[in-house]
Image (tube, helix red, strand yellow):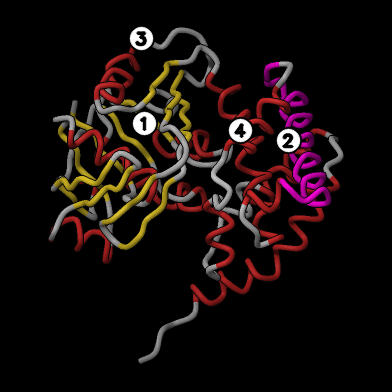
Amino acid sequence: MRIAVVGAGGVGGVLGGLLARSGQEVAFVARGRTLAALRGRGLRVSLPTGTFEVRPAAAEDPAAIGLADAVLVAVKSWQVREIAPSLRPLVGPGTVVVPLQNGVTAAEELAAALGDGPVVGGMCWVLAWQEEPGAVRSTGVPLRVVVGERAGGAAPRLAPLAAALREAGVDAEVSADVRAALWEKFAFIDPVGSVGAVTRAPVGVVRSLPETRALLEAAVAEVERLARAHGVALPADAVARTLARVDALPPDGTASMQRDVQAGRRSELDEQTGAVVALAGAAGVPVPVHRFLLAALLPQERQARAAAAAPGPG
């Protein structure tokens, strides 16, 4: 397959690297120091099983890559709306566009720019991050990707992509209800990221202290109630399954939003904690824990965005 990967951070770098290593034709859309690294020494991927390097094609302008069979969108959630229109040169009549963001709004944002036809639902379970431009690491969590038609039902056009991912060593599934899979992950990643960002503690500490454990459990329950209010068919044991995933994480694990907040970078606060508050308001669902978490994190988030927007010296 010809696969374009948009973003070479943790998720995009690991998936794109594995696909390239397995023989798929992979090209990255990247920029800045990451683009320079990919064009120079290539991409280094470190996994629990070892480290490997590949030298995939890379370009800043999607038009330089051309049509792809599949487009894996792996930028931060807050970047999706901005970059979506620029992805049109990648999309042909048979292209599938797969969002892999944390959150539940990326597919709709891509469809607004690219049309409903090519955009499907997708999510990725992985603990991964960029160590430096052109170098990514994944650890602790088995790599799993779920894709499916946004309206649900059979998705035969996604079978080739799932097969390519499995050949690359990824546990890939085509789901008849990708929306439920997406929200079940959201019930995990949003509370872990939000509570982790407020406490500034790794998950092993958060889940072991009774006070922060209670905060985390309450946040998970709020997302579960919100999903059901929006008609999402979560499993009956969704909360228990989510907490079991939290307990299985490496004790030093942190979510990407927490890492961004602690580093003073712009984070996915609006697309995770803020999205819960906004969607809850529309559905009339009380989410007091998320309102507290959002209020506590907003000052630093605004400061980080102001710093990013400020002109540099000279």
Amino acid type, label 1:
Val
Residue depicted at 40% across the width and 23% down the height: 117
**Image quarter of the C terminus:** bottom left
Residue on which the image places disc 1: 97
Q: Are marks 3 and 1 in contact (CB under 8 Å)?
A: no
Tell me which corner region of the image, top left, top right, bottom left or bottom right, holds residue 228. Answer: top right
The image position of residue 127, as x and y in percent, is 46, 43
**Which comes sooner in the sequence, label 4 or label 3?**
3
Q: Secondary structure at mark 4?
A: helix
The numbered mark, 2 or 1, whose residue comes first in the sequence reads 1
Would you call the spot at circle 1 few (<14 residues within 10 Å), some (14-19), or many (20 or more)? many
The crowd level at tag 3 (other Cα within 10 Å; few <14, some 14-19, many 20+) is few
- Secondary structure beneath label 1: strand
List the residue tagged with mark 4.
Answer: 245
Name the kind of residue labelled 4 in the image: Arg
**Residue 183 appears in which quarter of the rendering?**
top right
Looking at the image, is mark 3 or mark 2 earlier in the sequence? Answer: 3
- The CA span between labels 2 and 1 is 26 Å
User: What stretch of residues is rendered in magenta?
Assistant: 208-235
Query: Can you tell which of label 2 and label 1 is closer to the viewer?
Result: 2
Mark 4 vs mark 1, CA separation in Å = 28 Å
Q: Position of residue 134 (x, y in %)?
A: 25, 57
**Residue carrying label 2:** 223
